[in-house]
Image (cartoon, rainbow, N blue to C red):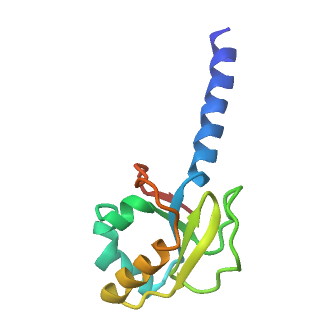
Amino acid sequence: MRFTFKLPVLLALALTAASSAIAETRLIMFEQDGCAWCRRWDREIGGIYGKTDEGQRAPLWKMHIHAALPEGVVLSEKTYYTPTFVLIEDGVEVSRITGYPGEDFFWGLLAELQKKLPDKAPSASSSKTHN
């Protein structure tokens, strides 16, 4: 009896968590094995990204470039190169950075992307990895 009650509750919680993942602002980093520029981004930016204002406003969500998009995520075009950084708001692409131009240029480009977002408080969500 207890098991039959817990299963629907757990399913409801899982569905709520999945839908909330797209009901916010995220920066999706599309990557793949062997990507030297992805490794460079990880070295130069990855460790600090979540601690920055930009990272608080758009928490990182890593995905393999060939993985299926989560339900509810809509991109304006297919992603061909890694890394590609796609800023999404409520599951819809706002803008993107294709490639990694180095630390100094990355922050400036990301700031330009985030200017396209509506004003609101930073998201308190943590980074996620989807492979």
| Closer to the camera in the image, 44 or 125 | 125
- Say if 70 sits above or below 109 in the image: above
As displayed, is residue 64 above or below residue 12? below
Task: Write the residue at 70% across / 66% down.
Answer: 74
60 w.r.t. 42: above or below: above
User: Taking the image as drawn, is residue 65 in sight?
Assistant: yes
Residue 45, located in which quarter of the rendered image?
bottom left
Compared with residue 43, is residue 55 higher up or lower down, i.e. above or below? above
Q: Quadrant of residue 98?
A: bottom right
Query: Can see residue 40?
Result: no
Q: Residue furthest front?
A: 119
For residue 71, side relative to residue 39 (left or right)? right
Residue 130 pos. (x, y %) = 55, 60
Image point (30%, 87%), residue name: 104
- At x 66%, y 32%, the residue is 11
The front one of 83 and 122 is: 122
Instruction: Examine the image and state in which quarter residue 84 appears.
Output: bottom right
Using residue 40 as the reference point, say whether residue 35 is left or right of it: right
Q: Residue at x 52, y 63 (%)?
A: 118
Whole-percent x, y for residue 112 in the image: 45, 80
Q: Where's the N terminus, which quadrant?
A: top right
Give x and y (percent) for residue 83. 50, 81
Q: How many marks?
A: 0
* Quadrant of image for the C terminus: bottom right
